[in-house]
Amino acid sequence: MADPKIKRIREARQGGVSSMAFMLRTVSAAIFSILSFAAVVAQPSKPSAVTQGFHSQARLISGGRQGDVWLAGIEITLDPGFKTYWRNPGDSGLPPRFDWSRSENVAGADIRFPAPYRHMDAAGVAYVYGKKVALPVLVTAKDRDKPVTLVLSAEYGVCKDICIPARADLTLDLTQDGPDRSVIEAALAKVPRPQALGAQADLSVLSVEPAIQDKPAFSVTVRAPEGAKPSLFAEGPENWYLSTSLPDDANRFTVIVDEKPKDASGPVPVRLTLVAGGKSVETEVSLDGNGQPR
C-alpha cells in the first residue's frame, strides 16, 4: 500500500498496550528530537558516500539503471548488539528520516523497506533491524539523459540499552556500472510483496473479522509455512494507534484499535505486513470509522 499517510503504529505484547509503553514512546520521541537537533548543530560534516556514526556506518550505494529508474540504496552497518528501526518503530523507537532535497536531477526517491523483526524489552515491542540492512531506493531522474547526483541527509536511531540518534550526510553520483547491484537486488527480494486478502499461498493473510474486546478490535487469521512462527505488523493512517497480539495456536492475531480520531470516517486503510519462514507479504484491508473491518 502506497498511502503516504501511513504512520508508525504501536504493537504490544498479547493482552494490550500498557500506559507505560505509551509514556516511553512519548519521552523517547522528545529526547530523540532534542538530541537530533544537537547532533546537527555540533557535528557539521562534508557529505561523502560513507559516514561513520554512533556505533554504526551509513553509506549510499549504486546499482546502475533498471528501465526508467536508477537502483540505489542506503546501507547501515551496526556494531554488535545494536539495532536500528523500521519505518514503523513500535512502542519506544522512532522511524528514520531521509531528506533528498539537495539532490541534483532527481524527481523522486522511493525507499523500500525490507521486513523487520520484533524485539521485546522493558520499553515494549520494537520493529528493528540488526547487524546490517540495505534499504533499496528507486530513483527517478528529472531528465534521464543527464547525470544524477544523490545528496542525502539521514537521521536514524541506534539503540542498545539506550537509543542515540545518528546523522549521516551522504552524496553519490549514480553510474551505469552500479557496483552494488547485487546488494540492492538482494535487499529488494526481502521487501514484502503486495498480496490480496485470502490469497492461496503458503504465506497469506486469509481473513479479517470483528473481535469482541473492550476497544474496537479485529481478528486476523493467517497461513504460514509449516513450522514457521508468523509475525504481524499493523499500520494505519495518522493518529490511528493499533496494537497486535502474538499469534495463537490457530495462527490468529488480535489487532486492537487503541486510539483513533474522534471524527474518523471510513474507509480507513490498514496495511498488514506478515512475516514467516524468511518470506513476507503486505495486504491492505479497510476499516470503518469505528475501527471495524469493512
Image (cartoon, grey):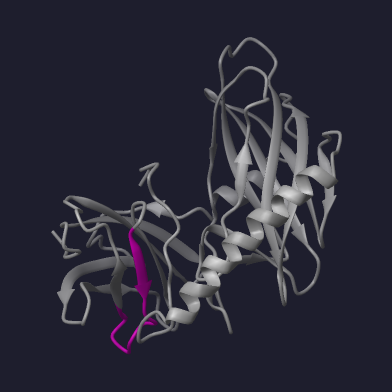
Q: Is residue 54 left or right of residue 88?
A: right
Magenta region includes residue 246: yes
Q: Is residue 18 left or right of residue 291?
A: right
| Residue 69 horizontal/vertical position (percent) | 55, 26
Q: Is residue 44 visible?
A: yes
Q: Is residue 229 visible?
A: no
Residue 92: image quadrant is: bottom right
Q: Is residue 289 left or right of residue 272?
A: left
- Pick the residue in front: 268 or 251: 268
Identify which residue is drawn at 57% across, 61% down.
Answer: 29
Identify which residue is drawn at 77% across, 32% down.
Answer: 171
Q: In this figure, what is the number of numbered marks?
A: 0
**Numbered range of the magenta stretch:** 240-253
| Residue 43 horizontal/vertical position (percent) | 85, 45
Identify which residue is drawn at 76% across, 57% down.
Answer: 77
Q: Is residue 11 above or below residue 13?
A: above
| Residue 167 horizontal/vertical position (percent) | 75, 48
- Pick the residue in front: 2 or 28: 28
Identify which residue is drawn at 74% across, 25% down.
Answer: 175
| Residue 41 horizontal/vertical position (percent) | 79, 43
Image quadrant occupied by the C terminus: bottom left
Magenta region includes residue 204: no
Q: Is residue 175 above or below residue 43?
A: above
As drawn, which residue projects farthest toward the bottom? Answer: 249
Q: Is residue 35 left or right of residue 119?
A: right
